[in-house]
Image (cartoon, rainbow, N blue to C red):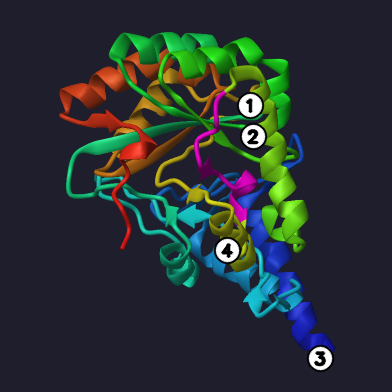
Amino acid sequence: MNGKMMSLIISSTIVANSFTGVCYSKGLKKISSENAKNESIGYNKFVDTKTHDIVNLFNNVFNNTENHNGVSTKEYSWYFQPKNDNTPPDGPKETSQLISKYDCFHLGDTSKKVLYLTFDEGYEAGYTAPILDVLKKHNVKAAFFVVKPYITSSPDLIKRMVTEGHLVCNHSNHHLSMASIKDEEKFDKELTDVEDAFESITHKKMSKYFRPPMGKYSELSLLYTKNYGYKTIFWSFAYMDWLAGKQPSHEDAKKRIMQRTHNGGIMLLHAVSKTNAEILDDVITQWEKQGYVLKSLDELPIKN
């Protein structure tokens, strides 16, 4: 690559980031876009479509894209194209074949008004118990994706999740990019450490669903996940709810959730969100009034 081309790519990326705004919180990257119609939403990435293309170009040039035993190790970030008309969003076109091949889900049954409610648990902020209260009131069974430190620091909440019929699922031990782990034994240990902690507290086996931290994945990481016996669970709805000091208003949060609710939606909420805990009763009530049925991940359609 000549110096002019490298300068062009770097300049384009810097300019793109200056428009979208880049900030860091708890070590996780967030890129925000003002254009909701064109934004591509990932776990911690909010970026307009043109910027997303530029960033992908930059990554394609500079990322390590070597193969491991013939399987690509190129890292991707999960995102989706949100729609405000209650229709299912599109996932990333560049990895659609991988999603089909390796037992991955971001949508359930889109032919019916069903939803799958999931929560990510990185640490306890005091809102999981109220969330569980609401779920119990509505007889909704959710999935909680937890890291090992959450299990060891909040054993009573883990036990309550199990007792009340929720799925407790794997979110890795150290919450790092699983695409960065090339050695299969090290990869598996990220999962087994969580399983062991869960089993020591509950004396039960952990549900075989895995959510990649930060939505980072590669073909190799999806293969390792499938080889280990897990289904990979991405999402078709998420919003910026995880910043403790910048919580969305009740009105804005409910509007965003209801606009983007869709058949077969795998809904990602963060349990560290004060807003989520306070609006969840109203949100589930509205879903029920609109005819949606909330189902367990165990009821996801079987892939051919």
Residue at figure coordinates x 69%, y 31% from the top left: 196
Is the Cβ of the residue at disc 2 closer than 8 Å to that at disc 3?
Answer: no
Secondary element under disc 4, as helix, strand or loop, is: helix
Residue to which mark 3 is pinned: 2
Mark 1 vs 4, N-terminal side? 1
Quarter-wise, where is residue 103 in the image? bottom left
Foreground tag (4 vs 2): 2
Secondary element under disc 3, as helix, strand or loop, is: loop
Label 3 and label 1: CA atoms lie apart by 52 Å
Quarter-wise, where is residue 203 in the image? top right
Q: Position of residue 219 (x, y in %)?
A: 59, 67
Q: Is residue 285 left or right of residue 91?
A: left
Amino acid type, residue under disc 2 in the picture = Glu
Residue to which mark 1 is pinned: 198
Secondary element under disc 1, as helix, strand or loop, is: helix
Is the Cβ of the residue at disc 3 closer than 8 Å to that at disc 4?
Answer: no
Amino acid type, residue under disc 3 in the picture = Asn
Is the Cβ of the residue at disc 2 closer than 8 Å to that at disc 1?
Answer: yes
Residue to which mark 2 is pinned: 195
Residue at figure coordinates x 32%, y 16% from the top left: 282
Q: Which residues are magenta?
A: 204-216
Q: Position of residue 261 (x, y in %)?
A: 30, 38
Q: Position of residue 98 (x, y in %)?
A: 48, 68
Amino acid type, residue under disc 1 in the picture = Phe
Residue 29 visible, this orientation: yes
Mark 3 vs 1, N-terminal side? 3
